[in-house]
């Protein structure tokens, strides 16, 4: 463990570029693969790239808001006090890593967007409580919850195929209820194993950390605790009084809460990314008490979203090349070509993990791989529900080495992708064992 952790940490620190350059290098790789292995020529690949470049604008805005609204809520006195009290459960570096991992995994099982924010924010509070812990490992542990998100309540693939009218309904012959996917014995067992073992595994990664990499306290100064000038000076003009009015925040905040209640009454426990952002936003408005304090925190938080805003279009361009050229389809068909009824779920999982590296979106990946894998499962008599969950787990698995999903957590933590990726590689190798065993034998 010590040797391996040091090795991967050194490798990524030395050779892994900034996340933006990583996206550019992936762009070059996919472009060349498309030219060599598909019917698309150099000009067509450029066309695919440019056409798909803006396809993730809505999603980029959602993820930017996850970072900003999470920052806003985290900087309210109520939330800071709650997270600080919860962090008192950890008194040693080992306890700190295990606690952050457990909280992050549970949060991601509830909702992936919620888990991304909670994992990073809680890691910061725990780092303040236990400053001797390796901050990089703590943030990696907070991000490791993304390993299980697709086996949880916000898993896009199992929820899609359980919804009437989904695009594969005719091929499957109807819907596949969540009792056969999310609540199947295979999925429950895999989730439970990771919930129990991942905190212990991450704790043992401490053996391989360098004591010189203990928490850099400058990275923890992410909170806006200084009173603004407008709060220190008595409001005099009507505009200043309005900006510092608690009544304004209370009214708009209560309107937001009313819609949240309405949403859950109407739709049940539908904790999608939009309602998560909505909850974070309006709780932030209420708990900051005045519009002025809220807006001052927004100004501090928006700078954390810069990486997401500029990098997500490049990933959209990569996805455009993968899908339009047929490259992702060729990858999937190659794995199907030597699969059997017994091995199809495992190879679906591995192929999904590879495709996820270039198409890091659960819904987008299912649109590409779903028809291929379901057709293969029906042709050879494999379990369609397990095959679908295999693709879902593959999508979640390689999140550990795909910076796309780490960007929000890294923005909150003030780190670069190379700071956590050495630990994430170890988590990737470890998680392969329970997932693959579950797919083959349960």
Image (spheres, grey):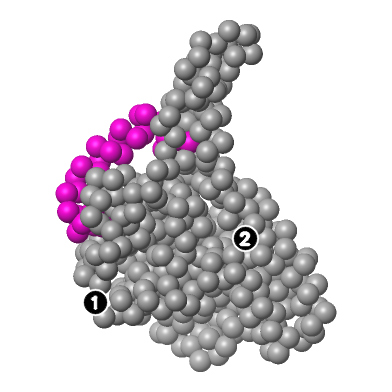
Residue 75 shown in magenta: yes
Residue at x 31%, y 55% (from the top left corner):
215
| Location of mark 2 (residue) | 311
Q: Quadrant of residue 362?
A: bottom right
Task: Name the residue located 80 percent from the left edge and 84 percent from the top edge.
Answer: 41
Q: Check the image and name the residue furthest to the bottom.
A: 338
Magenta region: 72-98
User: Which sits in the foreground, 206 or 260?
Assistant: 206
Give the vertical position of 88 relative to 22 (above or below): above
Q: Left or right: where does residue 10 sit relative to residue 281?
A: left
Disc 2 to disc 1, C-alpha distance: 33 Å
Residue 22 percent location from the top left of the image: 57, 71
Of the two numbered discs 2 and 1 on the same chain, state the one appearing first in sequence.
1
**Residue under circle 1?**
2
Q: Residues within 10 Å of mark 2 (few under 14, many from 20)?
A: some
Asked whether the viewer can see residue 74, the reply is yes
| Image point (71%, 90%), residue name | 36
Question: Is residue 101 visible from the viewing direction of this image?
Answer: no
State the residue in front, 340 or 247: 247
């Amino acid at each position: 463990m010590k040797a391996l952790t040091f090795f991967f940490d050194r490798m990524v620190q030395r050779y892994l570029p900034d996340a933006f350059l990583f996206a550019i290098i992936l762009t070059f790789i996919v472009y060349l693969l498309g030219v060599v292995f598909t019917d698309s020529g150099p000009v067509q690949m450029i066309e695919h790239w440019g056409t798909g470049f803006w396809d993730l604008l809505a999603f980029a805005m959602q993820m930017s808001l996850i970072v900003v609204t999470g920052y806003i809520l985290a900087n309210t006195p109520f939330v800071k006090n709650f997270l600080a009290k919860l962090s008192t459960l950890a008194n040693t570096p080992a306890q700190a890593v295990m606690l952050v991992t457990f909280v992050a995994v549970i949060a991601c099982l509830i909702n992936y967007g919620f888990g991304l924010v909670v994992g990073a924010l809680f890691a910061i509070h725990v780092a303040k409580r236990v400053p001797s812990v390796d901050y990089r490992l703590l943030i990696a542990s907070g991000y490791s919850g993304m390993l299980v998100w697709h086996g949880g309540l916000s898993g896009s693939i199992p929820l899609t195929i359980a919804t009437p009218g989904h695009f594969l309904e005719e091929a499957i012959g109807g819907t596949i209820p969540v009792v056969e996917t999310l609540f199947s014995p295979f999925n429950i067992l895999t989730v439970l194993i990771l919930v129990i073992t991942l905190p212990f595994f991450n704790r043992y990664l401490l053996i391989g950390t360098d004591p010189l990499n203990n928490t850099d306290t400058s990275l923890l100064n992410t909170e806006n605790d200084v009173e603004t000038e407008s709060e220190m000076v008595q409001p005099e003009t009507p505009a200043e009084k309005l900006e510092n009015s608690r009544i304004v925040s209370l009214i708009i905040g209560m309107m937001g809460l009313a819609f949240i209640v309405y949403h859950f009454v109407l739709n049940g426990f539908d904790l999608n990314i939009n309602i998560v952002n909505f909850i974070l936003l309006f709780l932030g408005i209420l708990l900051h008490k005045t519009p002025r304090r809220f807006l001052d925190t927004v100004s501090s938080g928006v700078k954390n979203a810069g990486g997401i805003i500029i990098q997500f279009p490049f990933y959209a361009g990569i996805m455009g090349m993968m899908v339009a050229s047929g490259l992702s389809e060729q990858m999937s068909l190659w794995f199907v070509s030597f699969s059997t009824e017994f091995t199809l779920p495992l190879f679906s999982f591995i192929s999904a993990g590879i495709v996820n590296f270039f198409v890091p979106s659960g819904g987008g990946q299912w649109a590409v791989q779903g028809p291929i894998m379901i057709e293969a499962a029906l042709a050879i008599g494999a379990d369609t529900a397990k095959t679908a969950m295999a693709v879902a787990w593959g999508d979640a698995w390689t999140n550990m080495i795909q910076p796309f999903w780490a960007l929000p957590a890294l923005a909150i933590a003030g780190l670069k992708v190379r700071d956590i990726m050495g630990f994430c590689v170890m988590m990737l190798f470890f998680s392969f064992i329970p997932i693959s065993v579950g797919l083959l034998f349960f």
